[in-house]
Amino acid sequence: MNSSRQFTRRRFLATAGPALAAPFILPGCAVGGRDRLQPSDRITLGFIGTGTQGKALLRAFLPRPDVQVLAVCDVDANRRVHAQNLVAQLAPAAAASRCAAYNDFRDLLARSDIDGVVIATPDHWHALIAIAAAKAGKDIYCEKPMNHTIREGRAMVDAVRAHDRMLQVGSMQRSMSQFRAAAELIRNGLLGKVDRVEIALTGSAKGLPAVPCDLPAEKPEPGLDWDLWLGPAPRHPYNSILSPRGLHKGYPQWRHYREYGGGGIADWGAHHLDIVHWAFDFDASGPVEVLPAPEPEAVSGVRVRYATGLEVTHIPDGNGITFHGAAGKIFVSREKFQVWLEGKLKAKDVDAGPRLLKEALPANAVRLYRSSNHLTDWLNSMRTRRLPLCDVETGHRSATACNLMNLAYYHHERIQWNPETEEFAGGAGNPAWLTREYRAPWRLG
């Protein structure tokens, strides 16, 4: 692991803001997990949000002999009991009987025997839960997009730094070999100067910007704490599109609605823009300008510009990233890895990345952080106290680019942005767009 990623309190407190005021009070005495883990220690985890994604993460962690799941939490009784039963079925026998189930995440965070938490709630909850977890001394795995607003992202960075926590964002494409290969080839100049990138975001939210929630009221789902599901979001009647009834399959469509998510721009954009940032070394920076789509009602066409001259355009079809350079182009997705040089296709299968890296790059080439398993990488960071592959600052910067794209769609304005101060520049934009109203008693800080 690169020694430049070594975690030190002095390094981070030199740049972090003051500790945030508590957005709410944790019950009991939350003294947090262990400050240091020994190599032989089994890491204890709690899971907050056990829907489709949370359940998938739970299944991935449970077989690991170095992990013990002590608690699950969900506002839906069906989901949390099912998750508790999964632990009983899949965990080693000695560990399975110790898993508790909670409705309120604050009760889980109050436990001093939990080292880390996995957050897989709807996006509008990420920041408040993660900040509370950091203050409770827990390391954090938080699903992408890391935050719902730009101000939330900076608050998360400050809290994680102030409390010396390890936060891994679930942008797991960084742990897939084809995306690392694409980023390394770009870093090492295989394509020459790259000034144009296209990202296609067709996925669970169909690549679209989110819309205001106008869903009609339905009969409440028994066993669902709807008020806690909403949390800091505006009060709205229950609708099963937001939180499906029973043990559902697939990904709920709350992400289509601005109150809870950022549409396909935040959903898949958090993956693909994250790789763009990695390829061009923008993990501590970001765009300087965002240009709206040609037509006010368009759902593609927004362009994001960086100080280097790079321009990233959201295109309507497909799902992946295309890097256009002076000497060729690279297309990368979860299913494909294609490289064209001088008009000829040089690689076309998803496993071609390592081979091409070996053939095309010298021994002294720039190499990027290597991870083959995103979850293992987080657990390693918990033990070593070195930053994980997709650290909180990295996740914040990727989410910021998504948020700025969404603002260009929502308001159809050209946006100038200062990534140093994280403020609008040149008289563009409204500072109110950087945050949101929080329903009492919830607050960011």
Image (cartoon, grey):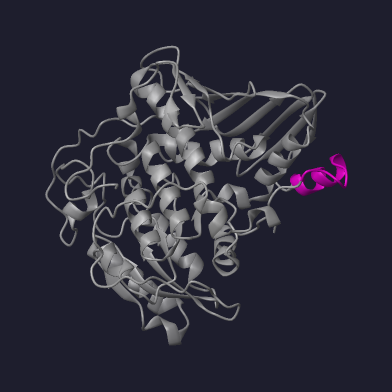
296 horizontally vs 34: left or right = left
Picture coordinates of residue 312, whole percent (x, y) = 57, 25
Q: Measured along the vertical axis of the image, is residue 94 above or below residue 307?
A: below
Question: For residue 348, what is the image quadrant?
Answer: top right
Question: Which range is magenta?
Answer: 352-366
Which residue is at the far bottom? 94
Q: Residue 218: name its quadrant.
A: top left
- Percent from the top left, x then y, of residue 432? 30, 28
168 magenta-colored: no
Residue 268 visible here: no
The residue lying toward the viewer, choosing from 375 and 223, is 375
Q: Which residue: 20% across, 36% down? A: 215
Is any part of residue 322 visible from this angle? Answer: yes
Magenta: main secondary structure: helix
Q: Quick check: is 364 in the magenta stretch?
A: yes
Task: Give the left or right position of residue 268, taking residue 133 as reference.
Answer: right
Expressed as whole percent of the image width and height from the top left, the position of residue 434 reads 35, 32
Label count reads: 0
Q: Quadrant of the N terminus?
A: bottom right
74 horizontally vs 57: left or right: left
Closer to us: 29 or 148? 29
Residue furthest to the top = 294
The one nearer the camera, 11 or 256, is: 11
Identify the residue at image location x=56%, y=35%. 285
Residue found 43% across the figure and 49% down from its top: 158
In this rendering, is residue 364 above or below 37? above
